Amino acid sequence: MKRFVYIITDRNRKNLHVGMCTDLLKTLKFYGEMPTLFFDSAQQLNRLVYFEEINTEEQAMERFKTVSTYTRPQKEKMIRPVNPDWVDLTAGLKYESGVRVRPAYGRPSIQASRRAVTF
């Protein structure tokens, strides 16, 4: 079973949190539902900036332990070559996995067009 080692940060890039999971999308959803799990609401972790896909659990655990001991400059050195602008990689993950997210803007909902018209 594949494992992921990831680095997630807040909008100001103050905190870098390293984690390991089997389902990256489900883990990111959990972070969104539990915004104050690790930090206060101003520093909620919501941007996936780096991840690695590893085939075995043993290798993933070793990589997780290694990356967890890195200092901030070492983590930044890992992130910058693959994600120089520190953009959120969640949208690309959702696209690759086939999860379609409907944008908030665009076509109006059906309920709005079915309102009764009175004269």
Image: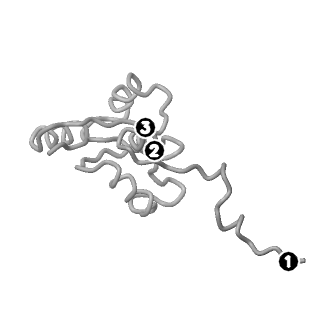
Which dot, 2 or 3, sits closer to the camera? 3
Instruction: List x then y, in percent, for residue 113.
Output: 72, 64
Tell me: 50 left or right of 45: left
Q: Which residue is mark 1?
A: 118
Q: In the image, is residue 106 above or below residue 119? A: above
Are the two marked residues, 3 and 1, in contact with CB atoms closer than 8 angstroms?
no
Q: Which residue is mark 3?
A: 92
The three-letter code of the residue at mark 3 reads Gly
- Name the quarter where the C terminus is drawn: bottom right
Tell me how far mark 1 sits from mark 2, CA to CA.
47 Å
Tell me the residue at 24%/47% (across/down).
Answer: 20
Q: Which residue is mark 2?
A: 47
The kind of secondary structure element at disc 3 is: helix
Q: Residues within 10 Å of mark 3 (few under 14, many from 20)?
A: few
Tell me how far mark 3 sits from mark 1, CA to CA.
46 Å
Tell me the residue at 27%/50% (across/down).
Answer: 23
The three-letter code of the residue at mark 2 reads Arg
Give residue 60's quadrant in the image: top left
